[in-house]
Structure formats: structure tokens, C-alpha cells
Image (spheres, helix red, strand yellow):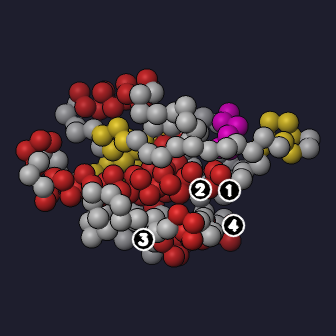
Amino acid sequence: VIMVHGGSYSDCGDIDNPGIVYMCNEIAKRGFVVFNVEYRRGVLPDRNVVPGFPDLEYISAQQELAVYRGIQDIRGAIRSIVMRERLLATASDYRIDTNNIFIGGVSAGSIIALQTAYQQSQTSQLDVVFPGISTVLGSIDQNYYIGNTTVDIFPKIRGVLNMWGALTIPLNKVNNPANFFLSNISRPPVISFHGDQDHVVWPDTEPLY
């Protein structure tokens, strides 16, 4: 089980957050190997409010860059975990079944986990919802992790735990969101928890699923 912490991608959120530590410990007590994974953080919120909507902030390129970096890091972490277990002399350390991986997250971390699991294509999915960002940050599978790009993480992901996260789709797929994911190698099941008073990720009124 690979868990991703929340924190709005800011420097103040990290893997020592009591909530994510508690959840990882509870999952580990039930016999699972659990990784609490760190990812690159840092974002400059755009505080220019929309007239008439004092609680609403613009979504700037900073947020898009932050999410994309997080996806790069979590995909790299999964590849590294698989490679260490399969190819390096550390297989006895964790005894992981690398064909049965579950990922999950909280808030910002859940957004990363969802994008990692369900946006599997660079060109037809990630470059569509994050236009132009690969020209700045490179491929979603940048080869600067221990687990190089020859490690295929799909369909090893068997399920996703989503806690108040969201999955971005293109506006032209709003009426048929499932069509955006039909070309995926795998479509693992997801269990989601989300409050209907969430004012950051509105559960019913945005192209976020």
C-alpha cells in the first residue's frame, strides 16, 4: 500500500502529518506493507479573488506544475519499490507482492494518487489535462529515480483509496467522462470518501471526478 500525504502542495505539508502517519500505521497493523511517500512540494497560491466570490481563488499554473511534479514522484516511487523488490538484493526486507499494489492519498495526495492510477497515457491524457507542462518538467516518467522507465507499473495497481481528492478530465469529456479512460491499460477499482461541504474540491459542480 503506497500512501500520499496532503497539504495543498505547500512546503508546510509533509509525510509527518499525524493523519497520514496514523492511517499508515493502522493499515500496517493489519498485515500490509505500507509506504508513506514524500514528493516534491512548493506552490505559490494565487490570492487574487474573483469579484463576487470572496472565498474563490484562481487556479494558476503553480497548482498545475505542483500536481504534475507529484505525479512524476509517485510514479517514480512505485517503479523504485518494484525494482528494489524484484532486482536488487533487498527482496527479503519487505517481501512485497509487486503484482498487487494499492495506492491512496489524502486531499492533495489523493489527487496525485488518482492521476497516477487513471491517467496512464502521456499524450492522450496527461498532456491534455496539463497542457504544455511536459515541455517544462519533462515526461511524466522522468528517468531520475531508482526505478527506471522499463518498470511497468500497470496493471500492477489493483485499487485506489481516495480521500477527498479529485481526478481531472478535459472539458469536452464532461458528458462522457468514462470515454477518457477507455484506452487505459487497466482501470482499477476505487473507494472514495468526500464531504459534500468541501469548498476546495466541489464534488458535484466541476469536471473533477
Q: CA distance from mark 2 to mark 3?
A: 23 Å
Question: What amino acid type is highlighted by mark number 1?
Answer: Ala
Q: Which residues are magenta?
A: 197-202
Q: Are marks 3 and 1 in contact (CB under 8 Å)?
A: no
**In front: label 3 or label 1:** 1
Viewer-closest of 8 and 186:
8
Question: What amino acid type is highlighted by mark number 3?
Answer: Asn
Q: Position of residue 171 (x, y in %)?
A: 69, 66
User: Is residue 111 shown above or below 186?
Assistant: above
User: Is residue 89 shown above or below 150?
Assistant: above
Disc on the earlier residue, 1 or 4: 1
Could you say which disc has been placed on residue 171 in the image? Answer: 4
Specify few, some or many for label 4: CA neighbours under 10 Å numbering under 14, 14-19, or 20 or more.
Answer: few
> At 37% across and 42% down in the image, what residue appears?
37
Magenta stretch: includes residue 156:
no
Identify the secondary structure beneath mark 4.
Answer: helix
Q: Quadrant of the N terminus?
A: top left
Question: What amino acid type is highlighted by mark number 2?
Answer: Leu
Q: Are marks 1 and 4 in contact (CB under 8 Å)?
A: no
Q: Are marks 4 and 2 in contact (CB under 8 Å)?
A: no
> At 60% across and 34% down in the image, what residue appears?
195
**In front: label 4 or label 2:** 2
Disc 1 target residue: 61
Disc on the earlier residue, 3 or 1: 1
Disc 3 target residue: 184
Q: Quadrant of residue 130?
A: bottom right
